[in-house]
Image (cartoon, rainbow, N blue to C red):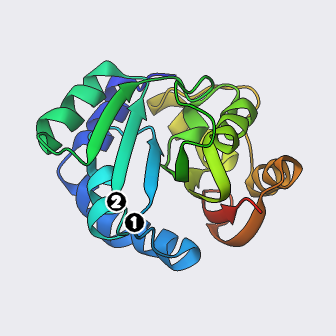
Amino acid sequence: MLLNRFERLVVNQPLRPWLQRWIEAPLLRRLGGRLDGMQVLELGCGQGEGQRILRRDFGAAAVHGCDLDPRQLGRARARLAPNSLMSWTHANAQQLPYASLAFDAVVSFNALHHVPDWQTALAEAKRVLRPGGRLLLLETLRGFIQAPPMRQLMQHPRENRFDAGQLCSELDRLGFQLDGTRRIPGCFLWLAARLP
């Protein structure tokens, strides 16, 4: 699902890259470790700050970003190009246009809760991961997005939303092994998992 005007304003404002680098990413890195030398896919790459963080702070060799919103992909290209170690693809997380076993890690900074069928998106993430591949997620949970102010300001799918337990259960069902989680109850979840 595409971001509405308010959400685009929130994710593209100047403070967002700082929050992503200094607040969100360090906890994800502590849970899941560095990604030195890895081929990484970022789901919902937005304006590209996650890609920059994954290269600079996580040590990824190359970061491939995909997003459903062509405007966000344009922002990412403008901010980060030319950089031969990054690429951008217009893609739906429910039908990733990548070969199976293409990546060492899949990372998402708050994109999965925008996907109507998030279970299919997780299955796609698993499909494109190599054996031993890692999944790092920072996610907004059902309790936060269904709070009355958020329902008014932001556009999210209304059905089939997840809490921390449901997200972890689905990963278990898909065969992921959890390395660790941290949460702000009812609001946000940081999660690191890997395939055997």
List x then y, in percent, for residue 43: 48, 40
In terms of depth relative to the viewer, which is nearer, 191 or 155? Answer: 191
Is residue 50 at least partly visible in the picture? yes
For residue 65, which quarter of the picture?
top left
For residue 64, which quarter of the picture?
top left
For residue 142, which quarter of the picture?
top right
Which residue corresponds to mark 2? 61
Residue 159 vertical placement versus 119 (above, below): above
Tell me the distance, in whole angstroms, between the alpha carbons under discs 2 and 1.
4 Å
In this rendering, position of residue 185 left or right of residue 19: right
Disc 2, disc 1: CB below 8 Å?
yes
Q: Residue at x 34, y 59 (%)?
A: 61
Mark number for residue 37? 1
In terms of depth relative to the viewer, which is nearer, 80 or 147? Answer: 80
List x then y, in percent, for residue 37: 39, 65
Q: Amino acid at mark 1?
A: Gly
